Amino acid sequence: MILMNDFKLESHEIQKEMQLAVNRVIKSGWYVLGPEVESFEKEWAQTCKTKYSIGVGNGMDAIEIILHSMNVGPGDEVITTPMTAFATVLAILRAGATPVLADIESDTALLSMDSVRRCISPRTKAVVLVHLYGQMKELDLWKSFCNEHHIFLIEDCAQSHLATWNDLPGGNFGVAGAYSFYPTKNLGALGDGGIIVTSDERLSRTASSLRNYGQSVRYEHPLVGMNSRLDEMQAAILSVKLKWLEGYTARRREIAGQYLKNIQNQYVSNLSAPLDAHSHVYHLYVVTSRYRDALQAHLNGQSIQSLIHYPIPIHHQKPCLDMLRDPTGLSISEEHAAQCLSIPCHPHMSQGDVERVIIAVNSFSPHH
Ligand SMILES: *Cc1c(COP(=O)(O)O)cnc(C)c1O
C-alpha cells in the first residue's frame, strides 16, 4: 500500500538522532519550557525570518493565543474559510469570537478576497488566512487589503512550513503566524506541538505569558491564560527534524511537479500550479473529480491510499450550522468538498511509487 504518510520509512540516521535527542532530555531532568524549547524557538524564528517565536501546545492553541493577544474576543467577528481543519474555526470559537465564513477560489481552494469583502461588517476584527495544502498566495495583497479595512491578518501556517511569498515565510504578512507540529504536518513532532511566530514584541510577550497560565514572573498572573506549553522532548525532536525539512520539502515539490505534468485524465483535474515554486510546499497534493468516490475506490483497489481534505465544509458541521457566512453562499466550498481528493505526496515515496500513482490516476474511468 502506498500510504499518505509512512513514518516507518524515515531514515535510520534521523531515528538515531531523535533517540540521542530524547536521551539528552531525559538526562537533563527538565521537561517543559526549558533550554531545548528556547533553542528550537530561536531556530524556528530564524527559519521564518521573524523576530520572535513562542512554542505552544499545538497549532489550534497557537491561533487562539494570537487572537487573545490581539484582544479579539466576544462581540468580535473573525472571517475565515469553511475549507480547513476544524481546528481553525474551533480556535476562533474558543477565543470567544464569532467566526464568519467566506468562500474559496475554485482553482486553489484558498480563501476568496471578493467573498471576504462581502463578509466584512463593523464588528470584523480579523481574518484568519489558511495557507491551505501548503500554499501561500498573494500575501502582499492580503496584507494591504487588511490594512485598508483596519482588520488584523492572522496566518494559519499549520500546513505551510517553509512556504514563502516574495521570499518571506508565513507569519511575516499578518500580525503573527500559527504553526502546528502535529506528526503528519511537513515538520512533525512525535506528539502534539505548535508555535507562534511574530515580529511584534508586545504580541510576543503577551503570547508567552498566555501559554503559561498568564504568568508574568513566577506565581504572578496578570492575565487569564491557559496551559499550552511546548515540552522539551518535542522541541529536541523538532530541532533534529528541522535539519531534514528543506530536503523533504524539495522532494515534495518534485513529486508534485511530476503529478502536475503527468496526471492527464478527462475525469480528473489538478488544481492550478502555484504562481512561483517557493510559494507551495505541498503538505497535500489535491486533485478534483466529479467522480471522486469512484476515483478513491479505484486507487484503493490499486493499493494507493487517499484522503479527503475536507469532506464536510465547516458550515455543515453540527456546531456550525447557523454560522455567519458570505450572503451569496459558499457554493464553491461545497463543490470542492464533494470533488477533492488528496493523493500520496510525502518525501519517503520512491520514484516507483510516484509513477504507480500517476498510472493509477490516469487509468481511472468512472464507467467500469
Ligand atoms: C493541523 C491544522 C491545525 C491545527 O493544528 P493542531 O496542532 O492539530 O492543533 C490548524 N489549522 C490547519 C489548517 C491545520 O491543518
Image (cartoon, rainbow, N blue to C red):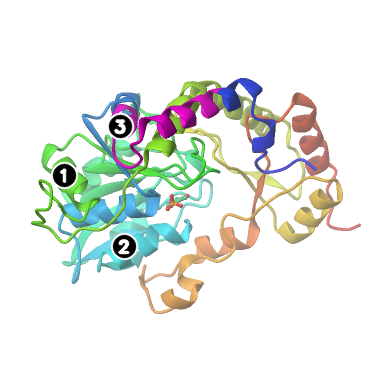
Element carrying mark 2: helix
Count residues near mark 1 (Cα–Cα under 10 Å), then give few for <14, some for 14-19, many for 20+: many
Considering only vertical position in the picture, is 368 above or below 50? below
> Where is residue 314 drawn, in percent x and y?
47, 66
Cα–Cα span, label 3 and label 2:
24 Å
Look at 20% across and 65% down and name the residue there. 73
Q: In which quadrant of the rendered image does the C terminus lie?
A: bottom right
- 1 or 3: mark nearer the eye: 3
Q: Which residue is mark 2?
A: 92
Count residues near mark 3 (Cα–Cα under 10 Å), then give few for <14, some for 14-19, many for 20+: many
Residue type, numbered disc 2 = Ile
Q: Earlier in the sequence, mark 2 or mark 1?
A: 2
Look at 25% across and 53% down and name the residue there. 65
Q: Report if residue 290 is visible in the image.
A: yes
Say the numbered circle drawn on residue 41.
3
Nearest the viewer among 175 and 194 is: 194
